[in-house]
C-alpha cells in the first residue's frame, strides 16, 4: 500500500463510528459451567495463540478468533458486557503482531499490505475509533508501542522523512508521533536501532550499531522520537531492565559489561556496586527505581539502595523473590527454610513459610498486591501454603489425598501473576505425582479451594475486578474462552473470627519452671456454624513437630452458636522444652473456610537458683 493510500484510509477512518464493525457476538449470560463462580460472558472461539488478553486496567479483553486461513481480532468491553466490532481486523494468527499499550487502553495490530509492507492500526478506548498509524511511511515490522500509546516504533522507510545515509534505506528504525502524525528516523549521524519502550510513559532505549570491524554497541536513551547517545553503557538484544515507573534502566558498560543504571531524570550513569562480587543479573524492586537486587555469585545476592548508596548482602541459597509492591524480599536460607526482609526497615527474620524448593527451582508466586506468597510445603506432595508477610503466618490448604499432589504455577520474570488484582484469588493445581491435571481457584480470604475448574485459567484481570478468563476445549477441537467471576454466590462471610480474649499474633510467653501462664483461645463464625481449632507446632528453627512443649495442656469447650474456646495452661516442668512456636487456626466445620493464622512463641526457662541468707 502506498503512503497516499494510507492517508486516504486514515481520512476515511476519521468518521463517526469508525471503530465499530460487525454486531456483537459474545453472549452476555450464557448457560455455561466453568466449575467455579459465575460465567459473565462467553467470549467465543479462540485461535490458541495467546496474547494480547486484557488491557492494562482490565476494562477490555481482546483475542484472535479463527476465520478461514487467518483470524479475526475480537474486542470485548468488560464493563459494558458486549463485543466491540473492529474494522480492518482480519489478521494473521500471530499474537506477536497484536499488543495493548502498557498503561492505556490502546490496542494495536497490523494487516498485510503486500509483502514486505504492512498497515498498522490502533483502537483507542477514549475515542472508540480505529486509526491508521504511520501512514506517512512504509512499515515492514512493528517493534513496539509506547506505554502511553502515544508513539509507535517500527522498521521501514519514509519518503517524507528519509533516514540518513548511515541507515539501511529499507530497514531503518522509526518512531511515529501520533499527535504530530509524523514518522521520524531515530538515526542522525549514527545508526540507532530501537530496542524497548519503558513500562510507563514513552521513554525508550536503543543501541548504536557501528558494524565491522569492532561491532561496538553504544546506548541511546530517549523519549518519543529522539534519543541521546552515550558511549559508556551499551545495550544489546533488548537487554535493558527497566524500573517500574520507567525513570531508570539497567544496561551494561561497554568496557567490562558491568551493569549500570541510567537515570532519565538527571542523565547520570552509575555502576552497580561490586562489594560482594560481580553483579551478573539485576532487577529493580517494586514500582520505582530506588532499590535494585543483584546476583553476584551462585548462590549470593545483594540489595542496593540508590538513594543512600548502601548495599547489603542477602545470604540466599538460590534466588530472591521480591513482592510486587516492593515491600518484602523472600529467600531460601537453608534446606526448606526461608527468611524474609522488610525492604523499608531492613529487618530480616526467619519466615514461617517452609517450601519444597531445591536450588534453582520455582515453586511459588506472590499475589499481585503482594499480600501473600503461595507455595508447596516440604516433601513435594504436601499442603498448599499461603504465607502472609505482614503477620509472618501461614494458612494451609490440604494436605491432598494420598494418591494426589498439589502444585502451584511457576511464575517466571515476565509471566502474568496467577492471582487476581486484589490478591483474593489465586490458582492451584492437583493431580498424580508429577502431573498437575486438575485446576482449582484458591480463595485466599477464606483460605479454601474452589472448583475444580472446568478448563484452564488463562489470566486474571490485571485491575478493576476479580475476573478470570477460562479456556475450555470443544468437541470441534477449537478452544472456547469464558469470562468468569470466581466469587462464590452468595459470597457469605463464613470465615471464623478470633474472640477478643485471644492473644494477638506474635505474642510471646516466657515462663519459668514452677510457674504457669493461662491462655484463652476462642473462635466463632458470624453464621453460627460450628468452628474447630487446629494447633500446629514448630521447633525454634521452624521445623514442624507433632508434639507441644512439655507442660502445655488445653481444655476445649463448645459454646453457643458453634463457637469454641480452649482454656490452655503452660506450666513447664524441670525437663522442659526450651522453645516451641504455635500456629493456631480455626476452620468452619461445614464450609471449610479458615480463619487467619495466629502464631505464638512459648519459651521455658529454668527457675532461678535459691540464694542463701
Image: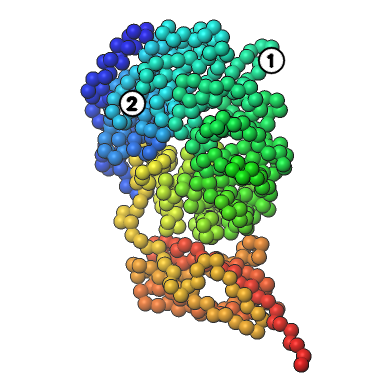
Residue 173: mark: none
Residue on which disc 1 sits: 214
* Residue at position x 65%, y 34% in the image: 271
The answer to whether 153 is drawn above or below residue 262 in the figure is above
The quarter of the rendered structure image containing the N terminus is top left
Which residue sits furthest front? 266
Residue 389 placement (x, y as % from top left): 53, 55
The answer to whether any part of residue 348 appears in the image is: yes
The answer to whether 259 is drawn above or below residue 408 in the figure is above
The quarter of the rendered structure image containing the C terminus is bottom right
Residue on which disc 2 sits: 123
| Residue 20 found in image quarter | top left
The reply to whether the C-beta atoms of the residues labelled 2 and 1 are less than 8 Å apart is: no
* Residue at position x 32%, y 20% in the image: 131
Q: Nearer the viewer, residue 283 or 448?
A: 283
Q: Helix, strand or loop at disc 2?
A: strand
Q: Quick one: label 2 or label 1, which is nearer the N terminus?
A: 2
Residue 105 placement (x, y as % from top left): 36, 32
Residue 379 placement (x, y as % from top left): 62, 53
The answer to whether 139 is drawn above or below residue 433 in the figure is above
* Residue at position x 52%, y 33% in the image: 265
Amino acid at each position: 500500500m502506498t503512503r497516499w493510500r494510507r492517508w486516504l484510509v486514515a481520512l476515511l477512518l476519521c468518521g463517526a463510528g469508525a471503530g465499530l464493525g460487525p454486531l456483537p457476538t459474545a453472549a452476555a449470560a450464557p448457560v455455561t459451567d466453568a466449575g467455579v463462580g459465575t460465567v459473565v460472558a462467553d467470549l467465543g472461539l479462540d485461535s490458541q495463540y495467546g496474547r494480547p488478553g486484557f488491557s492494562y486496567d482490565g476494562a477490555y479483553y481482546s483475542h484472535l478468533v479463527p476465520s478461514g486461513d487467518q483470524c479475526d481480532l475480537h474486542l470485548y468491553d468488560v464493563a459494558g458486557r458486549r463485543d466491540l466490532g473492529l474494522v480492518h481486523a482480519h489478521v494473521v494468527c500471530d499474537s506477536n503482531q497484536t499488543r495493548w499499550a502498557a498503561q492505556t487502553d490502546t490496542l494495536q495490530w497490523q494487516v498485510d499490505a503486500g509483502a514486505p509492507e504492512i498497515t498498522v492500526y490502533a483502537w483507542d478506548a477514549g475515542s472508540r475509533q480505529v486509526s491508521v498509524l504511520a501512514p506517512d511511511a512504509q512499515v515492514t515490522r512493528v517493534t513496539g508501542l509506547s506505554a502511553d500509546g502515544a508513539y509507535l516504533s517500527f522498521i521501514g522507510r519514509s519518503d517524507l522523512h528519509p533516514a540518513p545515509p548511515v541507515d539501511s534505506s529499507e530497514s531503518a528504525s522509526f518512531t511515529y508521533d501520533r499527535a504530530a502524525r509524523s514518522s521520524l528516523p531515530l538515526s542522525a549521524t549514527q545508526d540507532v536501532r530501537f530496542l524497548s519502550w519503558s513500562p510507563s510513559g514513552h521513554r525508550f532505549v536503543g543501541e548504536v550499531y557501528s558494524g565491522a570491524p569492532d561491532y561496538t554497541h553504544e546506548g541511546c536513551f530517549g523519549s518519543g522520537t529522539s534519543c541521546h547517545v552515550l558511549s559508556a553503557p551499551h545495550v544489546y538484544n533488548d537487554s535493558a531492565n527497566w524500573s517500574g515507573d520507567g525513570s531508570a534502566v539497567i544496561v551494561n558498560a561497554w568496557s567490562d559489561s558491568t551493569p549500570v543504571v541510567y537515570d532519565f531524570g538527571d542523565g547520570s550513569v552509575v555502576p552497580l556496586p561490586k562489594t560482594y562480587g560481580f553483579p551478573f543479573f539485576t532487577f529493580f524492586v517494586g514500582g520505582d527505581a530506588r532499590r535494585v537486587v543483584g546476583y553476584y555469585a551462585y548462590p549470593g545476592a545483594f540489595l542496593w539502595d540508590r538513594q543512600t548508596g548502601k548495599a547489603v548482602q542477602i545470604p540466599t541459597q538460590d534466588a530472591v523473590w521480591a513482592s510486587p509492591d516492593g515491600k518484602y524480599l523472600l529467600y531460601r536460607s537453608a534446606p526448606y527454610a526461608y527468611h524474609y526482609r522488610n525492604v523499608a526497615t531492613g529487618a530480616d527474620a526467619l519466615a514461617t513459610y517452609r517450601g519444597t524448593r531445591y536450588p534453582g527451582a520455582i515453586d511459588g508466586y506472590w499475589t499481585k498486591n503482594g499480600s501473600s506468597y503461595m507455595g508447596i510445603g516440604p516433601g513435594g506432595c504436601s499442603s498448599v501454603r499461603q504465607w502472609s508477610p505482614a503477620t509472618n503466618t501461614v494458612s494451609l490448604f490440604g494436605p491432598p489425598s494420598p494418591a494426589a499432589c498439589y502444585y502451584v504455577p511457576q511464575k517466571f520474570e515476565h509471566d502474568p501473576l496467577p492471582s487476581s488484582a486484589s490478591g483474593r484469588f489465586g490458582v492451584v493445581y492437583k493431580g498424580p505425582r508429577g502431573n498437575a491435571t486438575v485446576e482449582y481457584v484458591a480463595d485466599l480470604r477464606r483460605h479454601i479451594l474452589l472448583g475444580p475448574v472446568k478448563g484452564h485459567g488463562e489470566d486474571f484481570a490485571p485491575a478493576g475486578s476479580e475476573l478470570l478468563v477460562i479456556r475450555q476445549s470443544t468437541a470441534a477441537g477449537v478452544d472456547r474462552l469464558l469470562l468468569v467471576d470466581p466469587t462464590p454466590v452468595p459470597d457469605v462471610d463464613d470465615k471464623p473470627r478470633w474472640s477478643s480474649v485471644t492473644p494477638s499474633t506474635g505474642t510471646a510467653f516466657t515462663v519459668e519452671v514452677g510457674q504457669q501462664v493461662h491462655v484463652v483461645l476462642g473462635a466463632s463464625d458470624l453464621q453460627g456454624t460450628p468452628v474447630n481449632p487446629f494447633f500446629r507446632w514448630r521447633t525454634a528453627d521452624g521445623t514442624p513437630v507433632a508434639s507441644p512443649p512439655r507442660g502445655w495442656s488445653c481444655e476445649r469447650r463448645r459454646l453457643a452458636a458453634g463457637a469454641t474456646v480452649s482454656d490452655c495452661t503452660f506450666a513447664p516442668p524441670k525437663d522442659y522444652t526450651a522453645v516451641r512456636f504455635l500456629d493456631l487456626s480455626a476452620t468452619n466445620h461445614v464450609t471449610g473456610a479458615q480463619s487467619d493464622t495466629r502464631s505464638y512463641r512459648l519459651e521455658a526457662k529454668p527457675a532461678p537458683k535459691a540464694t542463701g541468707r
